[in-house]
Amino acid sequence: MTKTSLGLLSVVFTFIAISWACTPQQTGCTPVAPSAERTEMINYCNRKGINFTEHPSGLLYEIIQPGAGLQANPNSRIFITYEGRLFNDSIFDAMTNPALSGWILNSLIDGWKIGIPLVRKGGRIKLVIPSALAYGCTGAPGSPGRVSIPANSPLYFEVNLLDVQ
């Protein structure tokens, strides 16, 4: 396994452990409501030329390529490439080898559970995710050589959905 894949696995498993095992009382924090980050997210989209659509969850997205294959569902195994950035443009994670992905969609952050099914196999989407649908008030470590994700950070991802199983 590469350092990038090990770092990503660390981020994924940290999120799973935090989201399944901890309540706001246990972590000492309460997630920020997506509506509280909406202006910051819209400003980011405007700065980056993202022509977004707003999902009822608070997620902002732009479908770059809709794809034409299978659509992911919560139990699908997805193979993707992506880049994740903070709003200061620091890259906290990236996946360039889809063979190292292959995750069950339902095991990932809520923003991906909502956004990735908006495209089909072969699709490409930009996701601007409120912190409550990402790593919330706990944040997450970055992959090796990358920055960590601070608490209450909305995030930007560009995702290519290469296969759905």
Image: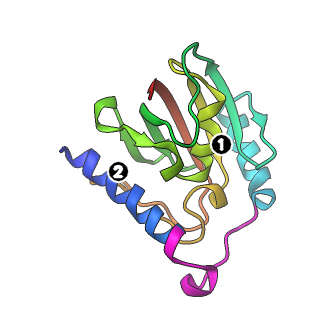
- Name the kind of residue labelled 2 in the image: Leu
Do we see residue 97 in this rendering?
Answer: no
- Name the kind of residue labelled 1 in the image: Ile
The residue carrying pointer 1 sits among few (fewer than 14), some (14 to 19) or many (20 or more) residues within 10 Å by Cα, namely some
The disc placed on residue 114 is: 1
The disc placed on residue 8 is: 2
The quadrant of the picture occupied by the C terminus is top left
x and y, in percent, of residue 40 in the image: 73, 52
Q: Earlier in the sequence, mark 2 or mark 1?
A: 2
x and y, in percent, of residue 41 in the image: 71, 47
Residue projecting furthest to the top: 68
Q: Nearer the viewer, mark 2 or mark 1?
A: 1
Mark 1: which secondary structure?
helix
x and y, in percent, of residue 57 in the image: 76, 49
Towards the viewer: 153 or 72: 72
x and y, in percent, of residue 3 in the image: 21, 48
Residue at image point 76% right, 64% down: 33
In this rendering, position of residue 153 left or right of residue 35: left
Q: Is residue 31 magenta?
A: yes
| Residue stretch in magenta | 20-33
Residue at image point 49% right, 71% down: 18
Number of dots carrying numbers: 2
Towards the viewer: 146 or 115: 115
Residue projecting furthest to the left: 1
